[in-house]
Image: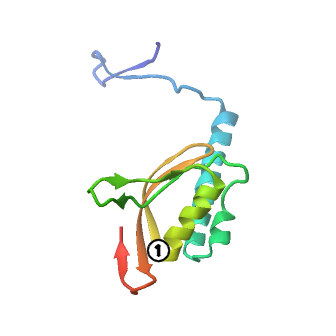
Amino acid sequence: MQGVRLANEEGDEPTMLTKPAIDIDPELLRSSAAAGLHAFAQVSDHLTKEETGHIPTILGTLVPGGPWAWAIVPFTQADGSVDLPLKTTYEGIEEMYGVIRGHSDVIGTEVLAEVRGSWFVFAEAYSHIKVKETGEEHAF
């Protein structure tokens, strides 16, 4: 693979080798960036609607027809093992929101890290919740 060789000021041996971008088509880069921004806007809207606690409103942020993947809240079992449910259907996601939002309200969420593609966002977030039964607040 060819690159651009940069020499230092004295004209000695090159000190850095750069390589061309994988794809420099401006329209592809522009459309990919726009798709990534759109994906982030959708996540932001979803997180805002999570705070309403209204399950139909939250589910309204899902893309019709999927694809979907939902994994949250590991459940510790009596034997000490951990079950992390993964839901990939609308009905499964609706069921889990019924469990989670039936237990607690989201007070706020801060995204700490994300992997964003042109059609998806995987996010690691810090959430603050309030348990409905006791009023206790927890962060996780």
The single residue placed furthest to the top in the displayed view is: 1
- Circle 1 sits in a helix, a strand or a loop, which is it? strand
Q: Position of residue 108 (x, y in %)?
A: 47, 74
Judge whether residue 47 can be spotted in this image.
no
Above/below status of 139 relative to 42: below
- The relative height of residue 1 versus residue 132 in the rendered view (above or below) is above
- Residue name at image x 61 percent, y 43 percent: 118
Query: Which residue appears at 62% of the width and 65% of the height?
Result: 45
Query: Can you see residue 61?
Result: yes
Image quadrant assignment for residue 24: top right
User: Callout 1, which amino acid?
Assistant: Gly
Does 108 sit above or below residue 35? below
Residue situated in front as seen by the camera: 91 or 24: 91
**Relative to the observer, which residue lies in front, 5 or 109?**
109
List x then y, in percent, for residue 84. Answer: 41, 53
> Foreground residue, 12 or 135?
135
In front: 11, or 88? 88
In the rendered view, tell whether residue 114 sits above or below residue 95: above
Q: Residues within 10 Å of mark 1 (few under 14, many from 20)?
A: some
Task: Please tell me in which quadrant of the rendered image residue 54 appears.
Answer: bottom right
* Position in image of residue 72 (x %, y %): 45, 58
The number of discs equals 1
Q: Which colour assignment does the render follow?
A: rainbow
In the rendered image, residue 73, in percent from the top left (x then y), is placed at 42, 61
Judged from this view, the residue extending furthest toward the front is: 78
The residue at which mark 1 appears reads as: 108
For the C terminus, the quadrant is: bottom left
